[in-house]
Image: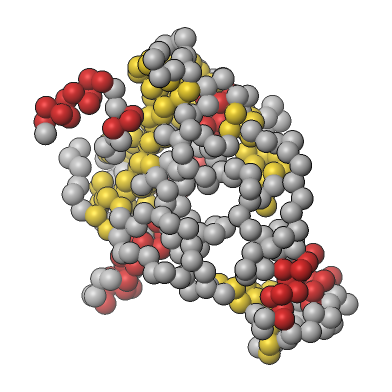
């Protein structure tokens, strides 16, 4: 399939718009003070002193009235709003190449460093925001009546390559079922590498540390979660009590001088950070991965971590330890084939490879073409 030359992207403003978090006081919260409510329910957002600062800085309203006394008792049914002040988000790319587009789906070539959905420090600088802005830039009435495209799966912030998005509710539902079905198959079937891949297949390129001996390696290590500082919901790691996950790793080139191996990885399941975890599990973490170490575990799982300091807005400062969104590794969603969610036509989408993930032959071929 020919690669589109279309690009979308609007430069990010200096500050985002801030956020508003809404709550309603439930009967189980009766008798709590304002500071007790926020410091216990949202302790992963800020330490006690941070919430006190937010309250005294006029950032919280109770039933549309600013309340600055942290010891105010809350009444059942009261509506609380925490107004998070605008902040400068970390640098992120804003230009995104469109690889494929029709009336139902759009496939993007996500650059490394750009988050897909809002989370953490990145609430505006995301793929989703650029899709919304692109839809809003359409001047026709019909364009405004249609829902804007939304991603139907995720790629890690440091991962580049194909991101599939749906432009209609029907396409979104069917694509979501494709991804869910592919993941569930791993749990239902024997882990043979030639089993049917369903309606969607994903192939990645990655640069692993060290030299892999076997030309093909099948990794079926389950992936679960552990508590980890700076990650509120927990960190995904290799875990025997986790959910099934299957990756098939094919060696493309070994570079003994650099002590690296260029690999192609086919995944059927889509567990978060699956390729990073599986390659580290077999002793070959992605080159430059700041988080995962040999065995599929984080480099500092047992590090002592107790930090009650807080940033300018009252929240915790950026974690000192590596977190999943940190970049530095080389992983690219290179090829995706799927049955079109509406027409059932087989579509193959290819995202051009970064130079560091090209084989020598591919690099020579591109040089000749240029």
Q: Which colour scheme appears in the figure?
A: secondary structure
Residue 337 or residue 319, whichever sits in front? 319
Q: Which residue is farthest right?
A: 31
Q: Quadrant of the N terminus?
A: top left
Can see residue 165? yes
Name the spot of residue 307 as percent of width and height, x first. 74, 54
Name the spot of residue 355 as percent of width and height, x first. 28, 32
User: As drawn, is 175 to the left or to the right of 189?
Assistant: left
Name the spot of residue 182 as percent of width and height, x first. 48, 35
Query: Residue, x 40% and y 19% (percent of image)?
Result: 258
Residue 250 or residue 349, whichever sits in front? 250
Q: Which residue is farthest left?
A: 369
Query: Residue, x 30% and y 35% (percent of image)?
Result: 354
Query: Residue, x 76% and y 68% (percent of image)?
Result: 49
- In the image, residue 286 sits, relative to residue 227, either above or below, namely above
User: As drawn, is 194 to the left or to the right of 224?
Assistant: left
Q: Quadrant of the C terminus?
A: top left
Total label count? Answer: 0
User: As drawn, is 296 to the left or to the right of 325?
Assistant: right
Name the spot of residue 338 as percent of width and height, x first. 34, 38
Task: Determine which quarter of the picture holds residue 67.
Answer: bottom right
Can see residue 167? no
- In the image, residue 182 sits, relative to residue 175, either above or below, namely above
- In the image, residue 208 sits, relative to residue 8, either above or below, namely above
Query: Residue, x 43% and y 41% (percent of image)?
Result: 159
């Amino acid at each position: 399939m020919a690669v589109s030359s279309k690009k979308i992207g609007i430069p990010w403003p200096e500050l985002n718009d801030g956020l508003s978090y809404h709550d309603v006081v439930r009967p189980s919260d009766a008798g709590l003070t304002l500071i007790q409510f926020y410091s216990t329910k949202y302790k992963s957002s800020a330490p006690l002193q941070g919430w006190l600062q937010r309250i005294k800085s006029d950032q919280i309203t109770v039933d549309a009235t600013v309340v600055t006394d942290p010891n105010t008792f809350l009444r059942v049914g009261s509506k609380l709003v925490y107004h998070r002040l605008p902040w400068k988000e970390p640098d992120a790319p804003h230009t995104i190449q469109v690889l494929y587009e029709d009336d139902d789906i759009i496939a993007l070539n996500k650059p490394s460093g750009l988050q897909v959905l809002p989370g953490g420090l990145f609430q505006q600088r995301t793929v989703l925001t650029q899709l919304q802005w692109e839809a809003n830039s359409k001047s026709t009435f019909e364009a405004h009546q249609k829902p804007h495209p939304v991603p139907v799966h995720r790629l890690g912030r440091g991962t580049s390559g194909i991101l599939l998005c749906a432009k209609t509710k029907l396409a979104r539902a069917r694509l979501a079922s494709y991804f869910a079905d592919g993941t569930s198959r791993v749990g239902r079937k024997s882990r043979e590498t030639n089993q049917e891949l369903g309606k969607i297949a994903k192939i990645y390129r990655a640069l692993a540390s060290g030299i892999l001996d076997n030309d093909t390696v099948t990794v079926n290590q389950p992936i679960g979660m552990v508590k980890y500082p700076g990650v509120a919901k927990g960190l995904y790691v290799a875990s025997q009590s986790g959910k099934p996950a299957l990756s098939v790793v094919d060696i493309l080139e070994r570079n003994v001088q650099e002590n690296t191996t260029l690999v192609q990885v086919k995944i059927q399941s889509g567990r978060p950070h699956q390729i990073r975890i599986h390659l580290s599990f077999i002793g070959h973490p992605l080159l430059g991965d700041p988080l995962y170490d040999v065995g599929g575990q984080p480099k500092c799982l047992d590090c002592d971590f107790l930090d009650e300091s807080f940033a300018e807005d009252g929240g915790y400062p950026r974690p000192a330890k590596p977190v999943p969104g940190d970049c530095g590794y080389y992983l690219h969603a290179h090829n995706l084939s799927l049955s079109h969610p509406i027409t059932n036509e087989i579509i193959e989408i290819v995202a051009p490879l970064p130079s560091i993930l090209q084989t020598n032959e591919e690099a020579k071929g591109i040089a000749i073409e240029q």
